[in-house]
Image: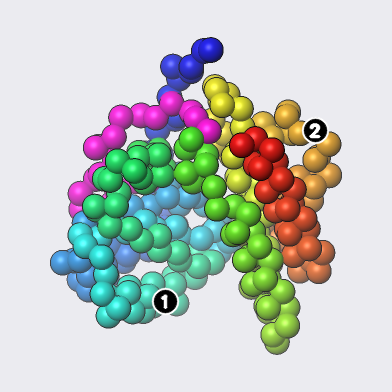
């Protein structure tokens, strides 16, 4: 049995796009001013962190590591701050906060989730850079399961949320955004079916799809459908919730068969 000696590519470190510099400065300033005593570190991940975001289309994805577990008033304050930032920065379609604590991020049981995430996806823009606490990780199915082991439940929840949006007064942009989020989650979640010692580590949706289809070519029509919805633009699609559930059911069966 051969174990790969390759490591996963490092987190992005190139220059930020000019279109997002004011937003990043505002994020740092507002969080430091209102939550500085709570925060251990502020990180960016996703397209803005990589430098390939599309103004007006891409989200701003933020990881916040806190010094301790937040009290209800802390959670409310961070949510109000997130909404205020999003309201004054139309260069992003929305802002997401992914929140954890320092003790959880450094806990040995979270090595393959928080440790991998901070080391290979997150750029520290303020505070303590916990990515320095970890050595580069080799590709492994253990990481895939730590990051996306909840895919079956998440896809089911996303299907329900999209259906609920369709029952409300029409908001095509919001429905398309939720469809895009669900499709991207599904494509990335296919990594849970990777071979134990597969040496590659996909970085893009296209790479995730290609690796998955190399093992499950009969699923091409399903993956092509979700790749279309994972991209920018698009229209509300009444089929999507049912197709999310169907894929989640199939995925659950594959995971059961591999136990």
Quadrant in the picture for residue 67: bottom left
Distance in Å between CA atoms under marks 1 and 2: 42 Å
| Residue drawn at 61 percent across, 27 percent down | 195
The disc label shown at residue 153, or none: none
Residue on which disc 2 sits: 217
226 left or right, relative to 195: right
Label 2 residue SS: helix
When the figure is inspected, residue 165 is found, relative to residue 158, above or below; the finding is: below
139 drawn magenta: yes
| Residue drawn at 76 percent across, 33 percent down | 216
Callout 1–callout 2 Cβ contact below 8 Å: no
Q: Nearer the viewer, residue 238 or 231?
A: 238
127 left or right, relative to 61: left
| Tally of marks | 2
Residue 23: percent from the left, percent from the top? Answer: 37, 63
Residue 105 visible in the snapshot: yes
| Residue drawn at 24 percent across, 37 percent down | 133
Q: Tell me which numbered mark, 1 or 2, is placed earlier along the sequence.
A: 1
Residue on which disc 1 sits: 83
State the extent of the magenta-drawn residues as a range. Answer: 122-141
């Amino acid at each position: 049995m051969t174990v790969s000696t390759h490591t996963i590519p490092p987190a992005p470190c190139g220059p930020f796009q000019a279109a997002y510099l004011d937003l990043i400065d505002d994020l740092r300033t507002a969080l430091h001013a209102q939550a500085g005593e709570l925060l251990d570190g502020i990180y960016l991940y996703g397209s803005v962190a990589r430098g390939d975001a599309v103004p007006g289309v891409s989200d701003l994805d933020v990881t916040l590591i806190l010094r301790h577990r937040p009290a209800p008033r802390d959670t409310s304050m961070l949510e109000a701050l997130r909404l205020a930032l999003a309201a004054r920065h139309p260069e992003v379609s929305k802002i997401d906060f992914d929140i954890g604590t320092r003790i959880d991020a450094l806990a040995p049981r979270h090595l393959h989730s928080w440790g991998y995430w901070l080391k290979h996806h997150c750029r520290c823009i303020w505070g303590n850079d916990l990515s320095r606490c970890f050595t580069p990780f080799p590709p492994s199915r253990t990481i895939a399961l730590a990051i996306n082991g909840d895919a079956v439940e998440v896809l089911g929840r996303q299907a329900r949320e999209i259906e609920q949006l369709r029952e409300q007064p029409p908001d095509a942009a919001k429905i398309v955004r939720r469809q895009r989020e669900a499709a991207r989650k599904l494509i990335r979640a296919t990594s849970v079916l990777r071979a134990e010692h597969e040496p590659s580590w996909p970085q893009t949706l296209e790479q995730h799809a290609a690796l998955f289809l190399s093992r499950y070519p009969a699923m091409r029509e399903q993956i092509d459908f979700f790749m279309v919805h994972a991209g920018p633009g698009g229209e509300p699609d009444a089929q999507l919730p049912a197709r999310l559930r169907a894929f989640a059911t199939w995925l659950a069966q594959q995971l059961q068969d591999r136990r």
